[in-house]
Every structure is written in C-alpha cells, then in structure tokens.
Amino acid sequence: MPAKPAESADNSVVTAAALVIGDEILSGRIREKNAGHLAAVLTAIGIDLREVRVVGDDEDAIIEAVNALRNHYTYVFTSGGIGPTHDDITAEAIAKAFGLPCDYDAQALKLLGDHYAARGLEFTVARKRMARMPEGAVHIDNPISKAPGFLIGNVHVMAGVPAVFQAMLDNVVPTLRTGRVLLSRSVHCPFGEGVIGEPLAKIQDEFPDIAIGSYPKYDSGKFWTDIVLRGAEEQRLGQAEAAVAAMVSTLAA
C-alpha cells in the first residue's frame, strides 16, 4: 500500500493525467499495467485521473503530449523511456517540452556509479544515460534498481517496468496535494443498457452531483449491467443508490 499523502484531503478537485511512452505498448509486445495501478492509487487518495494517453518513442509526440497535459491537469505521471538504450528518449523530450537543457545529473551519476561498483559491474556509457534529466529536476527515488525518476514542474517521470513504477509512485504519493475522496456504491441490474438507458438518465438528471456509470456484462447469451455511483457526500450518494435500486425493482416487477 502507498504511504499516506502529506496533506489531508479537502473539498477541491485535484486532477491528473497519465502518459504511457513506448513503441512496445502500441505494438502489443508488452501489455500496459501502470495506468490501471496509477488510477487505483490516485482514486484512493482523492485525485481524479482524467486522461490516459499512449505515445510511441517519438520525440515530437512526447513533447506535444507533455505540454498539452501539464497545462491542463494538476499532475502528469509518465511511465517508460528512461532506461539505458537508444530508444529511451523520454528525459530529453521532456526537457525540450520545458525548454530546458538535459544533461547528466551529478547526484544521479554518483548514485548509479556506487550502485554498479558495489555489484562489480562496469558503469558503461549506456548505464550513464539513466542519470540524464532536465536541469533543475528533483529525483524520484527508485528502491529497486536505483536509477531515479524525476519531477520537473508538475510532471512526474517514472520507469515503465511495473514493479519499479509502483515503487516510485509509493515515494511520490506523500508529496501530492489531495482533494475530495469519492465514495462509491454498486447496484446489480439484471437488464441490459438498452432497457435501463432512459430511466437511468432521468435519475442522473435528478442527481447531477453523483457520477452514475453503467457497465454492461455478457455471459451465456445474457446481458446484465453493473451500475456504479460515485459521489463525495454520503447522504446524497445513498439517496441516488436508493433511486437506482427502486428503478431496477420497478423494471423487474
């Protein structure tokens, strides 16, 4: 479990976006896992993940996406592209997005140099690439493989390997400003969305402060729906849940 955020939640809305970087994701060679983990962690601490983008190892695409997302959301979290190989271009691209030089960070060089020396391995030019980051960036600690991620502006740049990403995120969570934590309720509905669409829309109009989502299911030739309600106030959420449950009971009568 991630550490508790440094600041207690308030009633403000704190938003975030995820940027997943890597040709291997777009080609299907690797299944993306980091965005789902990020969504679960952020939801639990009151940060709304509003958007997830996936781009390849293309400098222009990374720059465009970073600039669009960082100007629109409270936080941006990237995964992938900060390793030792030629196609790991995330650090350079993000530096360009901020108009900053990208160079070897002295603290990162020492950290990695000591790490490889302790393992009896050569600190090669390729491995030194993992010490490159935009000027003025702050380290995000990596307890697994030591190569740090970094924070520049409101953009948190982290590894693509899920175990490393998750460990880095655990270190980031205590630094984040959190907002309202949404409560949730779920109502099982034995009907498909085509049956409940109109009455459910009327309930949504009645409860504009409650996010109501319908999630269709299918098995053995039969459709049904899980209706999920999310809101910040317990009483209003309970009223909306009761309205949805009554709607389902009426349809079943």
Image (cartoon, rainbow, N blue to C red):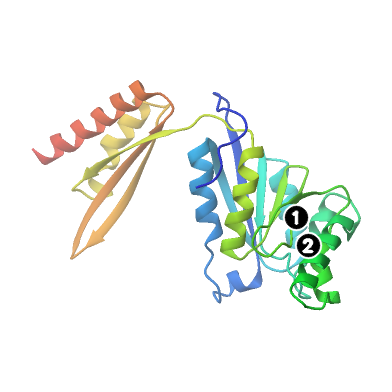
Indicate whether 128 appears above or below 135: below
Task: Report the disc number at residue 183.
Answer: none
Residue 110 position within the rendered picture, expressed as x and y whole percent measured from the top left = 85, 61
Instruction: Name the residue: 26% across, 49% down.
Output: 225
Q: Quadrant of residue 59?
A: bottom right
Indicate whether 241 appears above or below 64: above
Q: Which is more toward the observer, 20 or 9?
A: 9
| Callout 2 touching callout 1 (CB < 8 Å) | yes
Task: Report the disc number at residue 64.
Answer: 1
Residue extending furthest toward the top = 235
Residue 5 position within the rendered picture, expressed as x and y whole percent measured from the top left = 59, 36
Inspect the image, locate mark 2, and give the three-letter code of the amino acid beneath it.
Asp
Left or right: 93 in relation to 30: right
Left or right: 228 in relation to 160: left
Residue 121 position within the rendered picture, expressed as x and y whole percent measured from the top left = 78, 78
Q: Would you name the residue on which mark 2 appears? A: 60
Instruction: Name the residue: 57% across, 63% down.
Output: 162
Instruction: Name the residue: 64% across, 62% down.
Output: 144
Inspect the image, locate mark 1, and give the three-letter code of the amino acid beneath it.
Glu
Instruction: Name the residue: 61% across, 66% down.
Output: 161
Residue 48 position within the rendered picture, expressed as x and y whole percent measured from the top left = 54, 39
Q: Which is more toward the observer, 157 or 56?
A: 157
The quadrant of the rendering that contains the C terminus is top left
- Name the secondary structure under disc 1: helix
Q: Which is more toward the observer, 237 or 162?
A: 162
Residue extending furthest toward the left = 253
Left or right: 124 in relation to 198: right
- Mark 2 and mark 1: span between their CA atoms? 6 Å
